[in-house]
Image: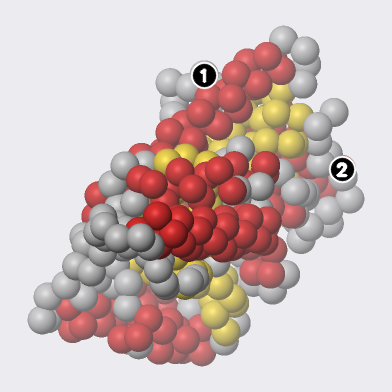
Amino acid sequence: MRPDFLRPLYARQGPFVSIYLDTGRATETAATEVELRRRRLSERLVAEGATAEELIPVADLVSDPERAAPGRAVFVAGPEVGYTEALPAPPRREIARRSPLPHVMPLLAQRGENVPHLRVLVDHTGADLVAIGAGAPRELVVAAEDWPLQKTGQGGWSQKRYERGVETTWDRNAAAVAETIDREARRLDAELVILAGDPRSRSLVRDRLGKEAASKLVMVEHGSRAPGAAPTLFAKEAEAVLDEHIAARRARVIDAYGEATGHNMAAQGLIETVDALRERRVRTLLVVDDPSADGTLWVGEAGHEIGVERDELRAAGVPDPIRERADAALARAATLTGAELWFVSATELHTPDGVAALLRF
């Protein structure tokens, strides 16, 4: 992933309050339970030096029923929310922290790799399209010609002409859907176009797609626009397509890292990786997803000012380095030096401290 969406957060001045809260409202008493959890975390933050001005925005945010979600991550800088994101599931653990840098690594790990893609349900009358990228999903409906749409099979002198008219309408509707897919795929820079719905309509749309969108097309079997049709099967198949796509990309990154180690184009371990980040040489940062990690590094004000030892930064001209969580420092350095970030398993990355990198030069 490219964590560029965090750049505006890092442009703010710390200290930062970072909160990960279970905000699910599945029961009648959920609102009360959420408030109790928020107060418990607020008490911990006050003990760490947080002020009322820093905590009020959090209270306003999590108490708003219109912004309810299974979980929420909130990062406050001064009296304002610098960034917040609804989580599709409760956080793996509730966190309350006040620190020089925002504690974003749990958010990135739970967020997972973002794959900009389109999900399309099609039939002879048009399509329902959802564009999923970095922001909130965007829904579109393609409604094209609606007559004639259905072959009757009845006899008569006009039957062939009528059926030709039906097929012409299907063709025009498929062309309208394909044109919308092409446009939205370009706008989103989509990596996948996942298409389901009526089998004949799918084929017609596929045959009318432009070369770029067609190269990203994956057709799945389940899904219908019919009234009352359950969306569950289509959603499951779409998620399976995404999982396979991400797994293939991760495998390519790991293979590239293995090849790079033999050509001095990889940093192995924390010390080498931190040196490369400080020199802005990291193209892809590899991190083992370990929620229990609690190591520390030294940082300065700029994103690339990062070191294992305090004297490293002083020698590089940083007058007053501060100690910070290693994962928070690595996330900021990757974001502000334009590096990609990939979470991998310990079996995929054989380094003692779970950190490595592919280098630009």
Which percent across, then down, holds residue 359?
76, 29
The residue type indicated by label 1 comes to His
Which quarter of the figure is the C terminus placed in? Answer: top right
Q: Nearer the viewer, mark 2 or mark 1?
A: 1
Instruction: Report helix, strand or loop for mark 2.
Output: helix
Please give the label number shown on residue 315.
2
Q: Say how many tags the image has.
A: 2
Residue 253 vertical placement versus 327 (above, below): above
Q: In front here: 142 or 12? A: 142
Instruction: Report helix, strand or loop for mark 1.
Output: loop
* Among the two numbered marks 2 and 1 on one chain, the one whose residue lies closer to the N terminus: 2
Which percent across, then down, holds residue 8?
69, 69
Residue 274 vertical placement versus 80 (above, below): above
Residue in the picture at 43% in, 33% down: 244
Q: In front here: 267 or 247? A: 247
Which percent across, then down, holds residue 37?
26, 74
Which residue is farthest left? 28
The residue type indicated by label 2 comes to Ala
Question: What sort of colour scheme is used for the picture?
Answer: secondary structure
Determine the image quadrant of residue 287.
top right
Circle 1 residue: 350
Residue 57 vertical placement versus 329 (above, below): below
